[in-house]
Image: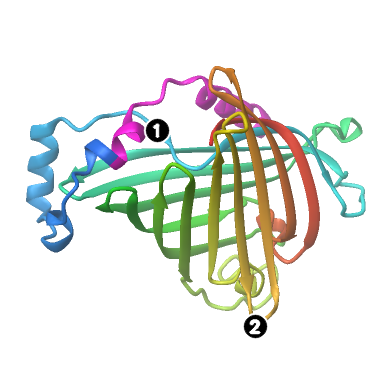
Amino acid sequence: MTKKIVLLLLFMILNMPLSAQDNDEIEGVIPDNFEGILNPPTPQEIIDYNISNNAKNGFSTHKQNYLLPFTYSDLPETDDRKQYEIKFQLSVKQRLLKFRGWAFYFGYTQKSFWQAYDINDSSPFRENNFNPEFFLRTKMWNGMRIDTGWEHESNGQELPDSRSWNRIYCTPYYENDRIIANLKGWYRLQEKNKDNAYDVNGDDNPDISKYYGYGELGLTFKIPEFYNTYISTMSRYNFRSQKGAIEINATIPLHLNSMSFMIQYWNGYGESLIDYNVRQQKIGIGLNFTR
């Protein structure tokens, strides 16, 4: 049943008409001035503004949406984990409120790891990571914005394989014709220690910051001279524990319904929550739908 629900969600998101929010967020929806930043609106002003301006409805893309039908990991195979699997990510957001230099969103991202080639075990989903969030987007100047929010991430598994954490974060973001840069810093909201691994109350992964650190740097390089290729990287590192990760994505447009050919490379800890303290190298190929 879980497999059918996840596949249905994938089909719906990849086929739904997304709103024009993305095209308007930087230029039109949030004006080019500092009025909203220096003079935050009152709650009643926000309500009145949204009613009078008839804010747009409908999902828009958030993070990357992609499907990698073939991925290979260098981790040794086990009875319940093969080296080849399918990986995909779904990510959308909904603007809830907007006012002057502010916009408030709900976002949802799901990353799934499907052992589709393990036919003898009925091709189970090895891991699903669920990542809802609320964030405030503030326009600073042309090409520059700041997202500040709260997010939860968990894998929905039973103990002792349950993993979860909550963070508050701040992400300055800049984009021009050649580069996209963002630096996401976060503070983990602490939970009490567990008495044992099967205690339902308490921290499922108290040492996750040792492997994820306290922030990540995202860089995307646009290469219009080479088929409008994008090379994007995500890197994070904890200097105290000397552990981290890097992800590199290369996307080349296919000019077929806005899809792009995609190659993804991963090296380090925490590709998924269940692997937050596991280091691996992984490569995948497939299609990117929103880069």
Can residue 138 be seen here? The reply is: yes
Q: Where residue 110 sits: x, y (%)?
A: 56, 42
Q: Amino acid at mark 2?
A: Arg
Q: Earlier in the sequence, mark 2 or mark 1?
A: 1
Q: Is residue 27 left or right of residue 198?
A: left
Count how many numbered circles sit on residues in the image. 2
Tell me the residue that label 1 is attached to. Answer: 60
Q: Is residue 272 magenta?
A: no
Q: Secondary structure at mark 1?
A: strand
Specify start and end residues of the magenta stretch as a single range. Answer: 1-26
Q: Secondary structure at mark 2?
A: loop
Tell me the residue that label 2 is attached to. Answer: 240
Rounded to the nearest whole Å, what is the CA distance between mark 2 and mark 1?
38 Å
Q: Is residue 194 left or right of residue 81?
A: left
Q: Is residue 3 magenta?
A: yes
**Label 1 Cα neighbours within 10 Å, binned few <14 / some 14-19 / many ≥20:** many
Q: Amino acid at mark 1?
A: Ser
Above or below, comparing residue 157 to residue 17 in the picture: below
Above or below, comparing residue 80 to residue 94 in the picture: below
